[in-house]
Image (cartoon, grey):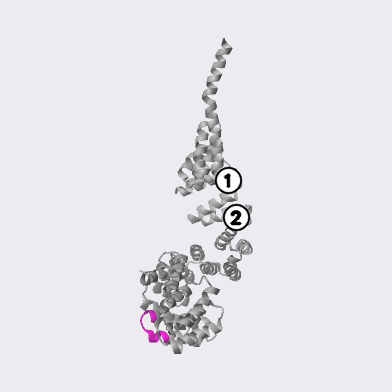
Amino acid sequence: MKNKTWLVIVSLLAAVFLPIIFTGYSKIKNGQAEFAAQNYAGAADSYERAALYLPWRDDLWEQAGIAASMNANPADAIKFLNRAPQLSEKGWLALGSSYFNTGESSSALKAYQQGLQLYDSASMYAGLAFIYRQQKNWSAESDALKNQTRLDAGDVYAHYRLGLLLTVLEPENALTPLMRASSLDPQTDSAVQTLRAALNISATQADPSQQMVTLGRALGLVREWELSVGAFEKAIKLNADNAEAWAWLGEAKQQAGQDGIAELNRAVTLDDSSVIVRALRGLYFDRQKKYPQMLAEYLFAAKVEPANPAWQASLGDAYAKGGDIVAALTYYQSAVQLAPNDSVYWRLLAVFCADNGVHVEDVGLPAAQKAVDLAPDDPLALDALGWSYFSSGRYANAEQILLDVISRFPTHLPAHIHLAMTYIAEGNRSSAFAELTYVRDADASGADGLFAEQLLKKYFP
């Protein structure tokens, strides 16, 4: 009788639980298939249901969390992953990225740090480095990148970024990761060579503060202005009376979206006779459209260094922006007289004439041709020649030159804009629209992109 009772109980339990167990394992298979098919939403749902049906399979919560993370559903990912008693490397990565995507950077850091106690993971170090970069914690980012590159020798960006950071933090160790980045991707070589030259020059300078000024300027040249700010701030800590460091800090802050005038004014109080300080203040006033103040700064610089063509050209720019075209032409011509073999100043003269429609035939076009003769492979010089032809009304010549520029230098956006304006003058509206659209999309937040958008609104309302 007891055996019959036991068999009945077993049968009842089997009738109740076997379908549940079967359903649970069926959901696991569904989850695996959906994950393989990149249906991450379905996979997360299947794994969640499987975990509820099979409570002893607590590993399923991690699978559900990873799938939810892949589905860009960080809230569910965090909920599922936190129910898992232990996580794999992928689970910790998913938890860290999910916290970050919900704006919880501190929780993301904690997740990566906890995961790294169990797994020596390049990907988790990359996550740490990314968060530290957002926080501008350069030292911690550098440490994370050192570990990332230790584990992943083939990540170009990690090596390059580490080299940038070490340029400020440990200049003596910066060259190794920079050269590694250059060897992995030739596209980084130009920036790496700029930094390499600066590192070599700074190593020969006796003044530690001036060393950091040299490195900060190089970081600016490769468009790393936030790190450049750090370098100039370090230079000032080493020598608070370094006027040049203060002036460059003002410039770097402007480039990083800040004001910078306080630092520039401080530089003037420390050394009011420095042409570097005066020139950088001139740039500041130029951006503020305060052209009389801009002119005053460059007049001072030109008085100190009358044979420097850069100040003559800057005076030409200042006078032109102030509306004195006659004086501007005189100074641009003075610049080419001081540097007759430098393509830059011939180009600036040509562009001035073309932009203002003055002496294009007798001065501007010959200047543009001279610029190209001196630098036949310079896209800026070639573009200036095309623009000069346009300004003189020679549209066919302009089109030919500008088409050559963009075929050889497709990323030189001003040539695309000038070609579009040539097409408009020729009545080729469809080609003009295509060129302007290309520039707008290629440089959405930049000056060229914004100008292209303005032209599109004007000519294609």
Q: Which residues are magenta?
A: 319-329
Is 419 within the magenta?
Answer: no
> How far apart are the alpha carbons under marks 2 and 1?
14 Å
Element under label 2?
A: helix
Tell me where residue 107 appears, x and y as whole percent: 48, 45
Q: Is residue 4 above or below residue 69?
A: above
Crowdedness of circle 1 by 10 Å Cα count: few (<14), some, many (20+)?
Answer: some
Residue 65 vs residue 95, the one in the foreground? 65
Residue 300 vs residue 147, the one in the foreground? 147
The number of discs equals 2
Element under label 1?
A: helix
Tell me where residue 271 appears, x and y as whole percent: 45, 74
Query: What residue is at 40 percent from the left and 74 percent from the top?
Result: 286
- Taking the image as shown, residue 358 lies to the left or right of residue 46, namely left
Q: Which residue is mark 1?
A: 116
Residue 134 vs residue 42, the one in the foreground? 42
Q: Which residue is mark 2?
A: 146
